[in-house]
Amino acid sequence: MSYQTHADLGGQLGHGAVTPEAEGELFHAPWEPQALALTVLMGGTGAWNIDISRAARETLPDYAQRSYYSIWFAGLEKLLAERGLVSAAEIAAGHALQASPPLPRVVKAADLAGALSRGSPTARPTTLAARFNVGDAVRTMSSRPPHHTRLPAYAMGKLGAVERAHGAHVFADRHAQGLGEGAQWLYTVAFDGVELWGPNAAPGLRVSVDAWDAYLEPA
């Protein structure tokens, strides 16, 4: 299984110009809102969590060749197939060919608006003391772990300073592996532009990254 995060494009060159779209232009084809709705509704069934869903999309080998909602749809197909909820024959046929396994829960239309408005808070209570304080110098882990990670590659092995402590939050890397929430302290770490991009960085540039405790070591 590939864990490469193809969505991790920060600081890379060669991806072409950014073409701004009209404000409020949300969809470009009739199937796109359907792909969004299906992904959100299946997430609500509890068959997987939001971090598993994100990892499924971002590790698609053809991520860079797909449009935004094509990525969402392909990620959904991947998750359904992995869990035996749909077969390759059913995907090709475009409809069910057999009864699917039961789901943990079913999202009803009447419950959807309330579920979306509540969102999925990630803050969790903890008795663990923060390992770092605001102002502490820290260095991020220097190598990519053997699993999907939220730490951007451009910030790996870099020196920064803690500028905020957010309390304990679900650890997305662990959650994406289906290993439980593993909540730990989350910090905002600020980096000088020169540390990230070298001497050609814009003068005075600072970049802030939210980083879990597991990403950090004292500098």
Image (cartoon, rainbow, N blue to C red):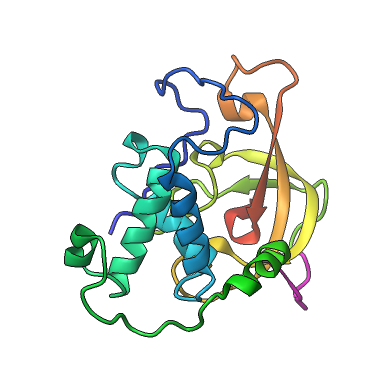
- Residue placed most toward the observer, 76 or 165: 76
Q: Residue 110, image x and y in percent?
A: 64, 73
Q: Residue 175, image x and y in percent?
A: 52, 68
Q: Is residue 160 left or right of residue 197?
A: right
Q: Is residue 101 left or right of residue 170?
A: left
Q: With respect to residue 197, does 56 lie above or below?
A: below
Asked whether residue 14 appears in the rendered view, the answer is yes
Asked whether residue 121 appears in the rendered view, the answer is no
Q: Residue 156, image x and y in percent?
A: 53, 42
Q: Is residue 10 left or right of residue 93?
A: right
Q: With respect to residue 191, does 137 lie above or below?
A: below
Q: Is residue 105 left or right of residue 206?
A: left
The residue sitting at 47% across, 68% down in the picture is 42
- Residue placed most toward the observer, 118 or 4: 118
What range is drawn magenta here?
121-130
Whether the magenta-drawn stretch holds residue 58 is answered as: no
- Residue placed most toward the observer, 212 or 37: 37
The residue sitting at 47% across, 60% down in the picture is 39
The residue sitting at 67% across, 65% down in the picture is 113
Q: With respect to residue 30, does 186 lie above or below?
A: below
Q: Farthest residue in the right direction?
A: 134
The residue sitting at 56% across, 62% down in the picture is 172
Where, quadrant-wise, is the N terminus in this rendering? bottom left
The answer to which image quadrant residue 90 occupies is bottom left
Q: Residue 170, image x and y in percent?
A: 63, 67
Main secondary structure found in the magenta portion: loop
